[in-house]
Every structure is written in C-alpha cells, then in structure tokens.
Amino acid sequence: QVRLQESGGGSVQAGGSLRLSCVASFSTSGAIMAWFHQTTGSEREGVASVYSDGRVMYSDSVKGRFTLTKDNGKNTLYLHMTALKSEDAGMYYCAERYGGFWTISGLKADRYTHWGQGTRVTVSS
C-alpha cells in the first residue's frame, strides 16, 4: 500500500524558513514526486516536482526561495522553504505519480495518484 506522510509544518514569521518532510512507504529512487500548496477555497497548486531522473521543476512563485530534495536512502522527500511570505501559508501535500509528459504536467495535481494527508504552514507578518 502506498503511503505518504508529511511533517514539518508549523508557524513562522514572514521571512523565516521551514523544512517539510514526506516519508514514503515505497522506494523513492526513480519515483516522480511533488509538493503541492492549497489554501482554503482554492485548488491545489504545484510548488515543486522531481522527475525519476532527478530533474526538478518549480513554480514561478517559489523559484529561488524553495528547494526540493530527496533522500532515497530514507525514502523521504523534502521541501526547504526560505524567505516565507504570507501567501505561502496553507496546507502542503506530498504526492506521487506515474507516467510521462512530466515537463508539461509535473505541477498539475490531476496527474498525481497518491497523496499524503498534508501539513499546515502558518506565516505571520
């Protein structure tokens, strides 16, 4: 059974940093995984994604501030978040998918099959 468990969310002041973790129940080596952000009443938006070959893509809103890394030895995906803004607040979800066309669909939520329960990030000004 595929399981994804996020952690690391919390409250931080604007300009601060957080590191989110997502532990997978499967080997992350070669997996296509991503982080998504969701605020109340909005759809999940892709933040960062890693392809099976290690390539990473980011949304324009987080490029230069967030970094996605993956530790295959621990089967864990990370999202290093810096220079946090109020608009970064919300739920963050880890997800995994199969299939190709990643370069055009890597940040599209409807292409992902398995999801974690999410972890909440609060940013205060």
Image (cartoon, rainbow, N blue to C red):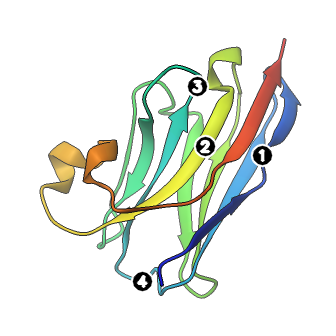
Mark 3 near mark 4, Cβ–Cβ under 8 Å? no
Residue annotated with mark 3: 39
Amino acid type at circle 4 is Ser
Spatial CA span between label 2 and label 1: 8 Å
Amino acid type at circle 3 is Thr
Q: Quadrant of residue 85?
A: top right
- The tag earlier along the polypeptide, 2 or 1, is 1
Residue 25 higher or lower than 16, as above or below = below
Q: Is residue 97 left or right of residue 64?
A: left
Residue annotated with mark 2: 92
- The tag earlier along the polypeptide, 1 or 3, is 1
- The tag earlier along the polypeptide, 3 or 2, is 3
- Label 2 packing within 10 angstroms: few (<14), some (14-19), many (20+): many
Task: For residue 107, say whether it is visible.
Answer: no
Q: Residue at x 47, y 87 (%)?
A: 27
- Label 1 packing within 10 angstroms: few (<14), some (14-19), many (20+): some
- The tag earlier along the polypeptide, 3 or 4, is 4
| Percent x, y of residue 24 | 56, 76
Circle 1 SS class = loop
Mark number for residue 29? 4
Mark 2 near mark 1, Cβ–Cβ under 8 Å? yes
